[in-house]
Image: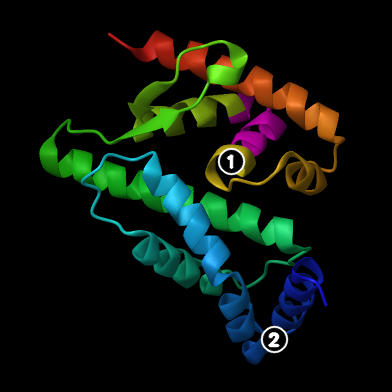
């Protein structure tokens, strides 16, 4: 059985209450979740107190708490994992900012392929702009989560969003440009 089918079968078994399937699923996806966590943390400040392992473990705890989710497939699982990681990092940034009164955490956004110099922005500013994007276009907000936070491929993102890969490419370019413009408007 290939990895995608194996993950999907384990997700379906877990949904039906099979705790052994949940444990096996974590074994199967652990390294991929660590890769996603490393990608998240690579964009964060260098002295971040969360490690990829800690981020994966916090995500796992939140995933286990999701009682009534109907897992569809591997891409759906990683999309939800990325959303949870984003929430954990935002909560962590809020706590740090509250503790330091203004020492916000930053992430790097790669915008080079749309002709804009890469920028570093605060995690909380990015979260606020993503919430604003969700109000304007929910699909594009989800697309940013899937591509930027989950690191899903164009094809995986297209499968989760149920659109054509060319739509993902077009929307990805537009969403990054929109985010950049909005984030530049927040700078003093």
Please, is residue 90 above or below residue 59 in the view?
above
Secondary structure category for the residue under label 2: loop
Query: Measured along the vertical axis of the image, is residue 123 above or below residue 176?
Result: below
Q: Which residue is mark 1?
A: 145
- Which residue is at a point 14% across and 44% down the rendered structure image? 99
Quadrant (top left/top right/bottom left/bottom right) for the C terminus: top left
Task: Return the mark for residue 17.
Answer: 2
Q: Is residue 46 above or below residue 117?
A: below
Residue 78 x, y percent position in the rendering: 63, 57
Closer-to-camera residue (124/157): 157
Q: Which residues are magenta?
A: 134-144
Q: Are marks 2 and 1 in contact (CB under 8 Å)?
A: no
Q: Name the main secondary structure of what is drawn in magenta.
A: helix
Q: Nearer the viewer, residue 101 or 111?
A: 111
Residue closer to the observer: 70 or 76: 76
Q: Quadrant of the N terminus?
A: bottom right
Query: Which residue occupies 53% across, 62% down?
Result: 33
């Amino acid at each position: 059985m290939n990895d995608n089918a194996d993950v999907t079968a384990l997700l379906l078994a877990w949904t039906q209450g099979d705790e052994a399937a949940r444990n096996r699923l974590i074994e199967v996806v652990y390294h991929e979740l660590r890769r996603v966590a490393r990608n998240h943390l690579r964009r964060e400040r260098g002295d971040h107190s969360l490690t990829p392992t800690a981020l994966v473990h916090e995500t796992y705890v939140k995933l286990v708490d999701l009682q009534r989710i109907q897992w569809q497939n591997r891409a759906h699982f990683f999309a939800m994992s990325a959303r949870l990681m984003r929430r954990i990092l935002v909560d962590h940034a809020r706590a740090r900012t509250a503790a330091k009164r203004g020492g916000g955490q930053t992430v790097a956004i790669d915008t080079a392929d749309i002709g804009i110099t890469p920028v570093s922005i605060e995690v909380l500013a990015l979260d606020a702009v993503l919430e604003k994007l969700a109000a304007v276009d929910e699909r594009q907000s989800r697309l940013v989560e899937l591509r930027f936070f989950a690191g899903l491929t164009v094809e995986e993102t297209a499968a989760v969003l149920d659109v054509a890969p060319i739509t993902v490419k077009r929307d990805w370019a537009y969403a990054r440009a929109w985010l950049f413009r909005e984030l530049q408007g927040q700078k003093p």
